[in-house]
Image (cartoon, helix red, strand yellow):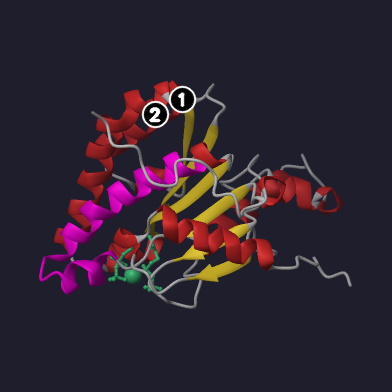
């Protein structure tokens, strides 16, 4: 017997027509969660994978077409080697294990960030997962790995500057559209809602350009404890906001 997740359907107090089209999440607090349990930090990361799996399913169940999560920042290399190595191995293992299910659930996975600096074996799994799911259309799932907003902006600048230097573009050609087509997230809509768990009031180098008009929701809940009820709360809060985009 399979246990039906609670809140399988979209809760009735949410307006289906006003759901965010794209939710971005800074999955923070794994280390603190583990510490609270008297466990090593890596156990928090391990548990965080289950949380992510469930949130992805939830987005699909509730009709949210895009989810982007921050899995590893360019600054996270500064953590103890043991933790970094654990995370790289974890990403690889989870990808290998979940790929078949993601295919059958019509999830399109994409990785953004400086992927070339990741371990080769992880790069192979990443390439395979993107290739195998590229035609899926139920939900667009983006994982920011070795991602930094500043680095993303710099690499776009360099790419555009080279084209200008080669005479392929003029400075006047540099529009918002052209710029966005040079970001890692090219083709993806901007996030409507940013969720950060574990109470920190900062964006930590995540999607700096894309976040210009995102609604920000911060919860004290630690990432491994972020479940459908918590997501429900975030969406209720989001639907109470008045998005003005600079207008009156
Ligand atoms: C987020 O949890 C996961 C990653 C950055 C990979 P943390 O590991 O930052 O957890 P805290 O912030 O130390 O509790
Ligand atoms: C942001 O969390 C990065 C990820 C969740 C992958 P951090 O824990 O690295 O951010 P800071 O250090 O609190 O800013
Ligand atoms: Mg943290």
Q: To which residue does mark 2 refer?
A: 102
- Quarter placement of the C terminus: bottom right
Is 32 one of the magenta-colored residues? yes
Report the Cα–Cα distance between label 2 and label 1.
8 Å
Query: How many residues crowd mark 2 within 10 Å: few (<14), some (14–19), many (20+)?
Result: some
| The quarter of the picture showing ligand 3 | bottom left
Residue 76 position, x and y percent, is 32, 64
Whether 158 is drawn above or below 66: the answer is below
Query: How many residues crowd mark 1 within 10 Å: few (<14), some (14–19), many (20+)?
Result: many
Q: Residue 238: which numbered mark, if any?
A: none
Residue 69 position, x and y percent, is 45, 52
**220 with respect to 211 (left or right):** left
Residue 133 position, x and y percent, is 46, 25
Nearest to N terminus: mark 2 or mark 1 = 2
- Tag count: 2
Q: Which residues are magenta?
A: 30-59
């Amino acid at each position: 017997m399979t246990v039906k997740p609670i809140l399988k359907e979209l809760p009735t107090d949410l307006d289906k027509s006003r759901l965010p089209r794209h939710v971005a999440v800074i999955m923070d607090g794994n280390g603190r969660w583990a510490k609270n349990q008297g466990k090593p930090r890596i156990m928090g990361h391990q548990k965080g994978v289950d949380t992510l799996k469930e949130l992805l399913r939830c987005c699909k169940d509730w009709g949210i077409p895009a989810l982007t999560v921050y899995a590893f920042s360019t600054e996270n290399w500064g953590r103890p080697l043991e933790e970094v190595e654990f995370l790289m191995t974890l990403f690889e293992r989870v990808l290998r294990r979940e790929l078949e299910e993601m295919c059958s659930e019509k999830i399109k996975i994409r990785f953004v960030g400086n992927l070339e600096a990741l371990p080769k074996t992880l790069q192979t799994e990443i390439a395979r997962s993107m290739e195998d799911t590229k035609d899926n259309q139920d939900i667009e799932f983006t994982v920011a790995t070795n991602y930094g907003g500043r680095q993303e902006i710099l690499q776009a600048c360099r790419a555009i500057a080279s084209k200008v230097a080669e005479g392929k573009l003029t400075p006047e050609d540099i529009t918002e559209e052209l710029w966005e087509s040079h970001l890692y997230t090219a083709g993806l809509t901007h996030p409507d809602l940013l969720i950060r768990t574990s109470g920190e009031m900062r964006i930590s180098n995540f999607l700096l350009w894309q976040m210009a008009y995102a609604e920000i929701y911060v919860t004290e809940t630690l990432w491994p404890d972020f479940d459908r009820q918590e997501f429900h709360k975030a969406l209720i809060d989001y639907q109470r906001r008045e998005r003005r985009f600079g207008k009156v």
